[in-house]
Image (cartoon, helix red, strand yellow):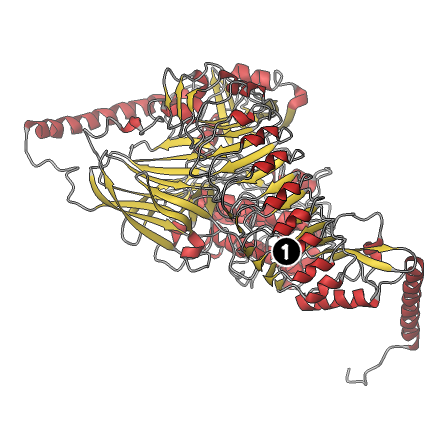
Amino acid sequence: MGGSPTGPTPSVLCALAFYFVSLLSLVLIVRAQNGTTPPSEVSALNSVFSHWRISPTFYQWNISGEPCSGAAIDATATTALGPTSGDYNPGIRCDCNGTVCHITELKVYALDVVGGIPEELWSLTSLNSLNLARNYLTGPLSSSIANLTQMQHLSLGINALSGEVPKELGKLTNLLSLSICMNNFSGSLPSELGNLIKLEQFYFDSSGVSGAIPSTFAALQNLQLVWGWDNELTGNIPEFIGNWSKLRVLGFQGNAFEGGIPSTFSKLTSLTDLRISDLSNGSSSLAFLKDMTSLSTLILRNNNISGTIPSNIGDFQSLSQLDLSFNNLAGPIPDSLFNLSSLSYLFLGNNKLTGMLPALKSPLLHIDVSYNQLSGELPSWANNSVLATGLDCIQQNFPCLGDIPSSPTYSDFAINCGGPEITSSSQIVYEWDNETLGPATYYETSTKRWAVSNVGHFNDINNPQYTSVSSSQFTTLDSELLQTARISPGSLRYFGLGLENGNYNVTLHFAETAFLNPPTWKSLGRRVFDIYIQGNRVWKDFDIKKVAGGVSFKAVQIDFRAQVSKNYLEIHLFWAGKGTRSIPAQGTYGPSISAISAARDFIPIVGKNPKKSKTGLIVGIVVPVGVVSFLSVLALYWFVLCRKGPGWDDDEELRGMDVRPYTISFAELKAATEDFNPANKLGEGGFGPVFKGTLNDGRVIAVKQLSVASRQGKDQFVAEIATTSAVQHRNLVKLYGCCIEGNKRLIVYEYLENKSLDQALFGKTSLFLNWPIRVDICLGVARGLAYLHVESRLRIVHRDVKASNILLDSDLNPKVSDFGLAKLFDDKKTHISTRVAGTFGYLAPEYAMLGQLTEKADVFGFGVVALEIVSGRPNTDSSLEEEKIYLLKWAWHVHENNREVELVDARLLEFDEEEVKRVIGVALLCTQTSPQQRPSMPRVVAMLSGDIEVSAVTSRPVYLTDWNFDTTSFMTTDTPKCKKGT
């Protein structure tokens, strides 16, 4: 203490000198073996990286100043610098001949680089691959790009480049792949691009170009893929495209083309994916399709196509999606169309098709034939599709409303699209709208006050969602209205039903939440769609963000005036192929709306009865008597129900559910599971065994079988069915149906390939959860619980949040499962007292000790799960040293000593330390002693997302300081009345 400072010892200096000499020798050896990079290329690369404020990773390449070293010359490394090349970003590849090395590949991908492209880049003339996609590059593209004559793969997509596309690109005659998509270019496509005769792939969708396709493009005979949607391409689609005989994929949606589809397209027999939409001022037939039997995706939407559906459509055995909607097709639908084994999506709505639907079909999952002129009886297979509302309802002019004019019931309506019921600051009650919609769905409320339909499929993504949820706060009085939205990839209609005729003021609420604000590539998306009111287009190319002044997360309110003359109001949001599709993720496009209200602009008659009559007196007497009689019968029913023996049938209880689930026969489930073959057994819990199976329609399922002897199991069966039927969210397990036959009780869920989170974290499995995946799992679970607590129309407490009740799908998205212990919660109550049920280690203290239940009990369980996700170990592990046995106790120890990284799973070699501290901080907040000190789940989502700061956590909970963990802790196996986890 207080002594003079001491410098490095001689031995340390010697060691350092030896290290640097050895490193220099290694570099010299590498250079001697592989060659050196010319100083001009080194200078150019350094200048570019300096301009963009990025640098290579020291241990990967550019070792001690030589760019062509390490991974840059490793022949075993990934050969292509594509998006999947891991952390080797920014990265280069070099070609060395023993004397000289040249930089041949450069990747600066999705790093949010901001600014122009430095001129020095164009001096790297040996480049044959350049990937600058997903940044925020601005300014024009220099004509000096002509220097890169060796270029084969050039990707400039998803940036903010502007100006005209330089004609000098036509000098890069070795190009095989060119992407300029999703930029802000202007002007026409240069005719010089016709010189790129080796070109195989051309992406210029959403690039901003306009005008006619140059005739020189006829020379591009090697093209295999062309994406050209969402531009302002004009004129006719060139006939010479029919000579691109190698073409496999062609997309021309959302342009300004005129005329029909050229008959020369009949020669494109190698096509597997054809998408053309929104042609104007012309007409064509489908005759050109005759020999295109290799098609997998065929979208010819809104093209004024007439004639009939080809009679040989049954030969298209690879067809998985067919969209011919919004055309003028007539005649019957060929029966063979319904027997294509690969076809999953069939959209034929808004045509003039006639005849009957076939009695039989293949496992075709999603069908829309609305707004046609079909007739006949509804086939049995339609009972669970959009057709279930009846053929009379879904045909032209929406005739299912034909009986409403004689008795209008309403003079206003309001809907919180995709969300729970909300009362606005102006006291308007926005009804809940979180019904699960699919690619072809029509839903009508039980009160017949309003309805909604969706038609369309989000292409190129798995498990698409048709609602969106945001935890962001908006600077408006009714922020909650904007936190959910109904989204659609095609056609989204809302109907106000049973309305009194007259003029209405219609208000539509929007907010763009999918795109971030600049400068980031995730801000470059554009959502564009058309708005129709009562069949009239009132806004073409509506862009939420543009109307909001170019910013996201801002409320947009649009008012319209509409006349109701047939007792219904139709609001139609229609995607006409415009806007980007893959920013920030694939499938981000199409209509989005947060809330709708319609209010009368006249003095209503509905609800008034100006004349007193005997009818009123009769009603005044009969109704109360009826109510009393009903209550008496109900009381008798419950008395009998309470006296039931174990052998009674519980089907009556299911019939009383608000949302009755789809039932599946026991015979079908028996066949699906191969007679409940033990080889198909996935596991067993307190409820009973779980089996894997496959339904007749190809869906893979998980079947939970109730143990016959369990009365508690029957109660949980009813609770689980009722809860899961009433809620739908991407982070909640999906219910397919149930089986109730005699004493057999089974629940049918979607099958999730990667099983439960506890198996992934603690079990013997080849599945590895890296740090980003773990963060996503935390967020997903939090969002699912936030939905249950706040966003669902029912307020639900899960009561058993634990790692084994979180399942992982094929993409490792988490889904909360097992609602057997779930409780509905009254908003007016601070808590409810109930029998304690749950799993030790996850139980909140006030619930475990006092039986007091609120949604904060789930928050506590989530906190424990979050710590398990970070640490990769269960909450209690007696095999560890004493101070580490209890995970919560150990977490507080490392937190108080600022050593949070010690809690991280030792298998994680790479992680974000700040994210680790954030997740641990949130988990410690969630596990506070007092429920009032724990955050709500929406706030947890906001903290984990980084939208708000994590509140400071200062003191340990009292249960960690005052309680003896070995004897009385609620976390031990001695806890009374707790159900041990399955």
Query: Is residue 654 in sight in this rendering?
Result: no
> In percent of the image, x 57 and y 58: which residue is there?
164
Q: Name the quarter where the C terminus is drawn.
A: top right
The answer to whether any part of residue 80 appears in the image is yes
Report the front residue among 263 and 84: 263
- Looking at the image, residue 446 lies above or below residue 99: above
Q: Which residue is mark 1?
A: 167
Depicted 350 relative to depicted 945: above or below: above
> Position of 562 compared to 476: left or right?
left
Q: Residue at x 6, y 27 (%)?
A: 614
The quadrant in which the N terminus is found is: bottom right
The location of residue 479, given as percent across then percent down, is 38, 54
Residue 591, position in %: x, y? Answer: 43, 44
Q: How many marks?
A: 1
Residue lying at the far front in this picture: please name it. 215
Specify whether 275 is left or right of 568: right
227 sits left or right of 152 in the view: left
- Kind of residue at disc 1: Lys
* The one of 328 and 751 positioned closer to us in this rendering: 328
Element under label 1? helix
Mark 1: few/some/many CA within 10 Å (<14, 14-19, 20+): some
Q: Nearer the viewer, residue 768 or 382?
A: 382
Nearer to me, 190 or 687: 190
